[in-house]
Amino acid sequence: MITKEIQNKILAAISERRANFDGSDSRFSVTLGISASQYSRIMKGDTERVLSDANWISIARKLDVQLRNQPEWKVANTPVYDFITSQLKMCQEKSMSLLLCDIADIGKTFTAKDYCKRTSNAVYVDCSQVKSKHKLVRYIAKEFGAGHTGTYAEVYADLVFYLRSLPQPLVILDEAGDLDSNAFLELKALWNATENCCGWYMMGADGLREKIIRSINFKKVGYTELYSRYGGKFQKVSPDNAQDSENFKMANAAIVAKVNMPEGSNLKEVVARSNGSLRRIYQQLNIAL
């Protein structure tokens, strides 16, 4: 059961996100998965039987609203956070495209989501959830508030038109290594159709790098061109040397833990138990709180 308290938390998150959405209320309601009339009513305080619990939960998930009494994860200005944030800003402002391939569990996803929360016309895509080209394009269209339920050709054309009309849109493609080959080729087509009008930022771990390199070596159609369009280089924050990389993870984890741990926690113990994993730090601190 979604209580009034939870509804108010979700409504506050909706208002915050709306402030960073340049389109109309009607388009914004599309991103939430509700109708324009439903959006209008709940924002006026009329929440009684307007949305189902499933609607509220879906919106909460999209906006990262905690339904339980869990602590809010605070931003820590780690080298990873600062590097990726600066790259995202550059891609958006200059309509550039870059490709980041780095080790897992260092805060790439958190940084990308945080950037989208704070920035207009920036959309985050978890490609592991939309692996095919149809799901990918429809999802991007929905996130921008464009039409996403018609024929695929119509959705694609409307999305391209809308991206070309928006001021400095940015699409962040996380877990991009999970996309199938047709989706990768469609990204090349989207890049061509929105050149100099839209920024693109592709992220992943070693699997994404290997997929692109292997596909280029086997001369698979489109991969060389796609790699070129995304800068022709694998961006990286962590050091290449194995020991340096481990030291980097531990230092990165210490910065995050220090900002988020409750008073009385032992920083050295928290970081040591985490072995440099931000997920383990979250689990530790979440339990402690």
Image (cartoon, rainbow, N blue to C red):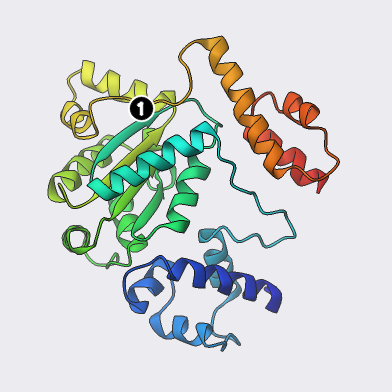
Q: Nearer the viewer, residue 285 or 257?
A: 257
Q: Nearer the viewer, residue 129 or 256?
A: 256
Q: Indicate the position of residue 92 as horizontal and vertical percent values.
A: 29, 49
Q: Indicate the position of residue 30 as horizontal and vertical percent values.
A: 37, 71
Left or right: 122, with 194 as reference point: right
Quadrant showing the N terminus: bottom right
Left or right: 12, with 189 as reference point: right
Question: To which quarter of the image does residue 36 belong?
Answer: bottom left
Left or right: 277, with 240 as reference point: right
Instruction: Find numbered disc 1 in the image and state the secondary structure of the residue it sits on.
Output: loop
Q: Is residue 266 visible?
A: yes
Whether 227 is drawn above or below 14: the answer is: above
- Residue plotted at (29% across, 64% down): 148
Residue that protrudes farthest toward the right in the picture: 264
- Residue plotted at (23% across, 31% down): 231
Left or right: 230, with 178 as reference point: left
Q: Indicate the position of residue 246 as horizontal and vertical percent values.
A: 59, 17
Q: Nearer the viewer, residue 204 or 74?
A: 74
**Residues packed near mark 1 inside 10 Å, few (<14), some (14 to 19) or many (20 plus):** some
Q: Identify residue type, mark 1.
A: Gln
Q: Is residue 3 visible?
A: no
Q: How many marks?
A: 1
- Residue plotted at (30% across, 60% down): 141
Q: Which residue is disc 1 drawn over?
A: 235
Question: To which quarter of the image does residue 220 belong?
Answer: top left
Q: Indicate the position of residue 57 as horizontal and vertical percent values.
A: 58, 66
